[in-house]
Image: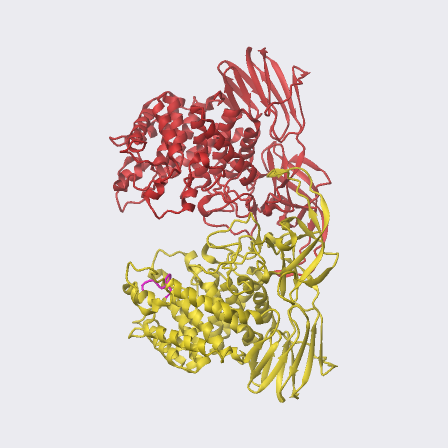
Chain colours: A red, B yellow
């Protein structure tokens, strides 16, 4: 397939009011803090392989993946900050430590090596050996690309080679596949980085074997039922899957891996499955914020249109994985709709998962919170500094440095601006600078800084009803195709494009089948979903009826970073006629009120607050 | 305390259009079917004590309680049907079988006797030995009262005597209490039936010891955390508990037992705890249907005002237990508010749990169901004939014959009509007949059939805003006190009271803190909560906006038993403007429509249907 690629992390520098400081906070706060947490909790020492029964900090089956993700993030940070020799040196020490834990046969897993050596490969369904290997491979590829050093990459090649002697189609191998998918996409990355097609073939084997009959997971344990297989996307072959089912993070990592395999093998049938699964999510199973997973139970997708707000799961990791999946389909197909969902998740349900400071995290991203919201399990109403199962914080470590990379793609002699966030790109001699204040402002000046002949594609977002584009002051009449306007010419240094995306406040409704949102509206402006916080509106959110006819204004959002715009408008406040009773018969009264809504992604950054995305209206 | 008692089961014959045929269906269908199910599943054979490893139908820790509840129901049925010698003989055989399973020391539990003898009393927190004993004791008391035979009663006295050698304040006993409460109230019944105060003292010990520090359940297993203790109402002494917490059936059985102990020992402090716990439920944690328990997770109460409709748990057993708890507080205090809640649960969230035929059951009683409702675990959108954990069907077996007993209470020289359902009472020489069609009609003729001097108290329900009462055609001016009008006189045979309760359709709202019901209304008429079914209205329930200003009418409910009234009225139907999209920006249109609502308790009796209790309105 003739596809695009996202730009390398180091080639894009963001300077916009929404994403840029997230990249910076990751570098300054999230990565160092996560390293500290990994040290405190034993996740780093675990690689020394000297834990003994009775000692504190007993390693856990998923620990290696946490540290691997922080290391991957640090590799990207080093790529973005070549001046930071201290971080580079620190990183080098960690790489040596990780590699030192590798066993002579290539196996690398600190839990099974020192805690349960007899259990190696005994429970592929539940235990995370292949998952951890996948994250270590991703980190190794990031390290190689950031530093040119092969020591981590070579170690993970030995590990992948060893895994290829354990799993595969041959009669003497296990005909299994990851219980927590991720290794599939990692092996594709490893194949790209090394040019060794064996890694791709192993990824393809894992994808193709999954869910075939007789079922590997049921051979491993005949007690496993259909629901358990579905939670792991192993209830049927992946090419036959059309509904996004089961554990949402596992599902989305799998789908991303499927897209990688489809792309590299021109496998149209597999790509069609990916598209159908994407549609299942985007058209039936996704919160308006790009959140995925409607229930804590199994951390899973449920059924079409089941999108409860106050018991949403919408794990931060799942939205990040959705961005990765959408990015792959975008790069394969060049269809703007994949960019639309990528942006929707990125600007809402991903960034809501981390505080502006970069130090606290939501595991689950609720869309409605009040003092009376009951939260289940590890779901919290306020962000937390860490979790026992700390996948989300460590996912942010590696995700945030890639923000610029999502904004830009490239193909042969072509650059594609997927998200018009201000910043600069420098790639293969082409330099472009983007200005403006997107996503708060729709005026986007783009300056080509270097002369050359190349195609330049600008995305016109799916949410945008009207726009204007000029080149050096003259209107460009080209209509968007598949969501992009493509200009091919001999560019002169200093050529100036001016893209203006009209960005009114939009009243959005949900399909009537989404009973949780019946009679409710959401407010969007550009890619941003807005929400009511009690911080601005008092603890009356479910009694506020937004006046959709009275018009809306924007204004600087109180006590949020410079440049952040709030939406203001008129409303009616319903009186509390209950007199304290649980059920009552008086009719409430309506009085005039105003409201202030802020971007959902920024909620809970001004202290504890109630939250409401789907608002009542008049 | 100078209290009332509910009338014995055999002394009331119902003839109303709502309850009477439920008693009959229980006798003709529910009890015989449950006996069959107990036989098929091995619950009866388990009492033969010849199960061996490898045989089918391995007994389960709660099986004895299931069969005990069916037997208890059969005892009541025999009391109501003295002509049915065949059922009496069948019952006698089961009693012999049950008693034959008793061990020489008095222990009676078929699971631990034959499956896990070494585990007796090893896990009081999780296993159900004391719970099963309680249900067997209740059955034994019912058997003694229905037949006069002491054989089952004496056996259970020996069992209770034995339990009293295992648990108690003495140094050599276990200082524990039931992990699933129920035995407390059963022991009070046993004390009443036998006159042996030792059983009451053991009940009181269980109540008083519960939740004391050091905590027995944590001594049994130090790994148990606060949440687990709270699920079992053992996180603090019961006298200090003010919020209804944890597993809702366990909680309500405990509270009923606490009320029994408080009553029998004039324990005002304990009664105050009962009242506070009742208020916690009725004013903050109860569905409008009388449903209790907001979550499947732990089958538990959650927090104040957390009452989700489409993920309600509201277990049938919990509402039946609420009726038992409310009945006790009503009989102790003579306060009408306890009768109000008893009636609210009985006429809505209890009877919704069983089909009109008496053959199918809801475990959980949802308040909102659509094709897009996701149901968790064993929660179903349609009633089921049985469950692996079949507490609810077997609870109905014993609950339904008591319906008449809930309607009437007595005290010295006093009869009290708690629920004016048509029927007749014959008690200690006093005969009274109640006519009318309550709860569908508010005109209630009451005829005293036998002369005598006694107090007669008629409840004026809390939901009633206006009423009239005449005696032999002349207005009675007495005002209700605590929800009852009390008339004391020399009654002549043929004296006629005519009570008229005005019964308009009422629009009810929920406290604004119940965010699940924000902007919604419920419709009630008399004690009945009404609901929309797609059977009458099409699959558009969340798009129907009830017009609360246009007035309502009543009419015979289509395809439901004679006498059942539906509510009809005007509405607006919101168009589906989504064009199939998950999120969209068009504004829906409203068109005129009508609606039909039927009693919630009768939903899902005309085939599969969507359901909505809390309706949108204009």
A221 on left or right of B291? left
Q: Is residue B503 depicted above or below A261 in this figure? A: below
Q: Is residue B8 visible?
A: no
Instruction: Assign the magenta stretch its main secondary structure.
Output: loop
Q: Position of residue A343 (x, y in %)?
A: 55, 31
Q: Is residue B389 visible?
A: yes
Which of the two residues, A47 or A116, is positioned nearer the viewer here?
Answer: A116
B541 on left or right of B69? right
- For the point 47% across and 64% down, the residue is B393
- For the point 38% across and 77% down, the residue is B152
Q: Position of residue B441 (x, y in %)?
A: 68, 70
In magenta, the rendered stretch is B121-128
A618 on left or right of A421? right
In the image, residue B307 lies in the stretch drawn in magenta = no
Q: Position of residue A243 (x, y in %)?
A: 50, 39
Q: Is residue B474 depicted above or below A342 in this figure? A: below
Q: Quadrant of residue B345?
A: bottom right
- For the point 48% across and 31% down, the residue is A324
Q: Quadrant of residue B389?
A: bottom left
Residue farthest front in this picture: B86
Q: Position of residue B334 (x, y in %)?
A: 58, 76
Q: Is residue B129 depicted above or below A470 in this figure? A: below
């Amino acid at each position: 397939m003739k596809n695009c690629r996202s730009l390398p992390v180091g080639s894009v520098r963001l300077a916009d009011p929404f994403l840029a400081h997230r990249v910076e906070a990751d570098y300054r706060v999230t990565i160092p803090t996560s390293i500290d947490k990994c040290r405190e909790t034993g996740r780093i020492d675990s690689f020394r392989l000297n834990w003994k029964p009775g000692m504190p900090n007993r390693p856990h089956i998923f620990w290696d993946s946490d540290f691997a993700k922080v290391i991957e993030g640090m590799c990207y940070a080093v790529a973005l900050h070549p001046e930071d020799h201290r971080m580079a040196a620190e990183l080098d020490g960690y790489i040596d430590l990780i590699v030192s834990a590798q066993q002579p046969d290539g196996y690398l897993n600190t839990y099974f090596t020192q805690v349960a050596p007899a259990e190696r490969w005994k429970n592929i369904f539940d235990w995370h050996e292949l998952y951890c290997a996948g994250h270590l491979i991703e980190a190794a590829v990031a390290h190689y690309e950031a530093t040119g050093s092969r020591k981590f990459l070579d170690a993970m090649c030995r590990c992948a080679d060893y895994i290829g002697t354990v799993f595969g189609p041959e009669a003497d191998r296990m005909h299994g596949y990851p219980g927590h998918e991720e290794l599939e996409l990692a092996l594709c990355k490893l194949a790209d980085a090394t040019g060794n097609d064996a890694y791709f073939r192993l990824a393809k084997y894992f994808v193709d074997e999954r869910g075939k009959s007789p079922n590997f997971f049921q051979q491993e344990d005949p007690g496993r039922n259909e629901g358990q297989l579905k939670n792991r996307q192993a209830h049927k072959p992946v090419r036959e899957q059309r509904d996004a089912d089961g554990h949402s993070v596992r599902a989305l990592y799998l789908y991303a891996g499927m897209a990688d395999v489809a792309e590299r093998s021109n496998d149209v049938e597999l790509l069609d499955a990916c598209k159908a699964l994407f549609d299942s999510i985007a058209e039936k199973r996704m919160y308006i914020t790009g959140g995925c997973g409607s229930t804590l139970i199994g951390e899973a997708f449920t059924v079409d249109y089941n999108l409860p707000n106050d018991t949403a799961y919408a794990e931060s990791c799942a939205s990040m994985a959705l961005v990765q999946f959408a990015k792959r389909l975008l790069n394969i197909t060049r269809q703007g709709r994949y960019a639309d969902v990528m942006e929707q998740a990125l600007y809402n349900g991903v960034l809501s998962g981390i505080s502006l400071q970069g130090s606290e995290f939501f595991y689950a991203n609720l869309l409605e919170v009040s003092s009376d919201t009951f939260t289940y399990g590890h779901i919290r109403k306020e962000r937390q500094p860490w979790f026992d199962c700390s996948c989300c914080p460590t996912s942010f470590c590696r995700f945030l440095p890639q923000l610029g990379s999502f904004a830009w793609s490239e193909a042969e002699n072509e650059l594609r601006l997927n998200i018009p966030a201000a910043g600069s790109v420098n790639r293969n001699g082409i330099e472009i600078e983007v200005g403006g204040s997107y996503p708060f402002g729709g005026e986007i000046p783009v300056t080509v800084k270097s002369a050359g002949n190349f195609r330049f594609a600008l995305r016109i977002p799916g949410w945008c009803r009207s726009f204007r584009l000029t080149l050096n002051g003259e209107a460009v009449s080209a209509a968007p195709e598949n969501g992009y306007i493509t200009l091919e010419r001999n560019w002169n240094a200093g050529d100036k494009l001016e893209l203006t995306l009209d960005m009114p406040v939009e009243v959005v409704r949900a399909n009537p089948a989404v009973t949780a949102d019946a009679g409710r509206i959401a407010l969007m402006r550009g890619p941003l979903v807005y929400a009511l916080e009690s911080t601005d509106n008092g603890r009356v959110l479910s009694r506020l009826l937004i006046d959709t006819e009275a018009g809306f204004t924007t204004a600087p959002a109180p006590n949020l970073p410079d440049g952040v715009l709030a939406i203001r408008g008129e409303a009616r406040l319903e009186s509390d006629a209950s007199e304290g009773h649980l059920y009552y018969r008086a009719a409430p009264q309506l009085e005039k009120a105003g409201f202030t809504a802020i971007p959902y992604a920024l909620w809970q950054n001004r202290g504890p607050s109630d939250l409401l995305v789907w608002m009542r209206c008049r």
